[in-house]
Image: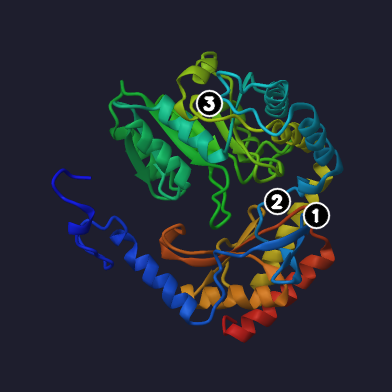
Amino acid sequence: MSEGISQSDRPVTHDAEKGDLFSKFDPLIKQREDLLESGVEDPFNLVMERVLSPTQAICNGRETILLGTYNYMGMTFDPDVVAAGKQALSDYGSGTTGSRVLNGTYQGHKECEEALKAFYGMDHAMVFSTGYQANLGIISTIAGKGDYIVLDIDSHASIWDGCSLGNAEIVPFKHNDIDAMEKRLRRIPEEAGKLVVLEGVYSMLGDIAPLKEMIAVAKKYDAMVLVDEAHSMGFIGENGRGVAEAQGVIDDVDFVIGTFSKSVGTVGGFCVSNHPKFEIMRLVCRPYVFTASLPPSVVATAATSIRKLMHNADKRKHLWDNSQRLHAGLKERGFTLGTEEAQSAIVAVIMPDLEKGAAMWEALLKEGLYVNLARPPATPANMTLLRCSLCAEHSEEQVGTILDMFERAGKTVGII
């Protein structure tokens, strides 16, 4: 409290005035209030009362098909994964209460990193407490003041935050535009440190990057390359290593970032690399050094899941079949989609505006289907969309049911 001013002398203000740090959020507060006053259920506050399987839960007291969970390979209820977590909880307790560089590295953390190295065929693996922290930590540490980061304009928030934290020069380019990327690289001083950051699958529209061509351009200008494969690990590529593997360029990638909260089915993040100096990152990467490590049960489930994902070709094929069938079926029924054809396990259904999107979301929930409602500024080009993420555990019958639900809801709301 400032000297000479008592609490009773301070003016009481409840409106958005100068000094109110919440004033910047007023437009969003108004938008949310208007949406809820229209009678629509809050699409960003859904409670899953009980989860029955990777594809079903109880929401609002009724059984609901899950089509918005990123549980791509359906590993959350895998018996081996669950058993590993229970055993680690019993053997090691509920948490580490410490950083990886102090008391927070248990045998399970090393085994998880060994599983990642085997999965990717790389020399080094580093596990973070979240996927967000993996991007935040790796990007901010390897590219600092005086360095340049060239990145896709549609990059995930964790990538942008990693760029900001490291104080590097940030150079964005038009989404998936190879020529635009090269123009940016050409203007950077030849002697400067350069990092190109790309994603295998972009999470909003589910489209993939032309990594083969982009990485070739990056190497032409002596730039290091980081690829975030969060939404492709586990099912894209012959061994599930992602888009870089599918396009035959994984050996040209310097850093692969990923997460455990998608195909792996738990929580956490990682970076794998073949760079000979990579291990120094454990001492200089602040989001790794200054945070508590993952609980033993989590790394045990992750390690078990990763090892199983190495031998899941049949599930990968089934997931692709599901994605192609849903995409084609929605297109045939008259919906506008984010991609011309299925490119990943994400199928984005474009809505006319937020109000119609929220109404469609609620209509689907009443049908017994949960999807993600995504809105600006998270979405590209100020789109509002319903984002569907398929699971390898969705049956053919469920995909058919989902299509029928979309058709009924779309007609009710007036989308189709």
* Badge 1 element: loop
Real-space CA distance between mark 2 and mark 3, rounded to the nearest whole angstrom: 27 Å
Q: As displayed, is residue 334 above or below residue 279?
A: below
- How crowded is the residue under tag 1: few (<14 C-alpha within 10 Å), some, or many (20+)? some
**Residue in the picture at 53% in, 34% down:** 134
- Note whether residue 353 is visible: no
Front-most of residues 230 and 381: 230
Residue position marked by numbered label 2 in the rendering: 71
Residue position marked by numbered label 1 in the rendering: 393
Residue 254: assigned label: 3
**Residue in the picture at 32% in, 33% down:** 186
- Note whether residue 288 is visible: yes
Front-most of residues 1 and 372: 1
Q: Are marks 2 and 3 in contact (CB under 8 Å)?
A: no
Q: Quadrant of the N terminus?
A: top left
Disc 2 or 1, which lies upstream in sequence? 2
Front-most of residues 10 and 239: 10
**Residue in the picture at 59% in, 76% down:** 360
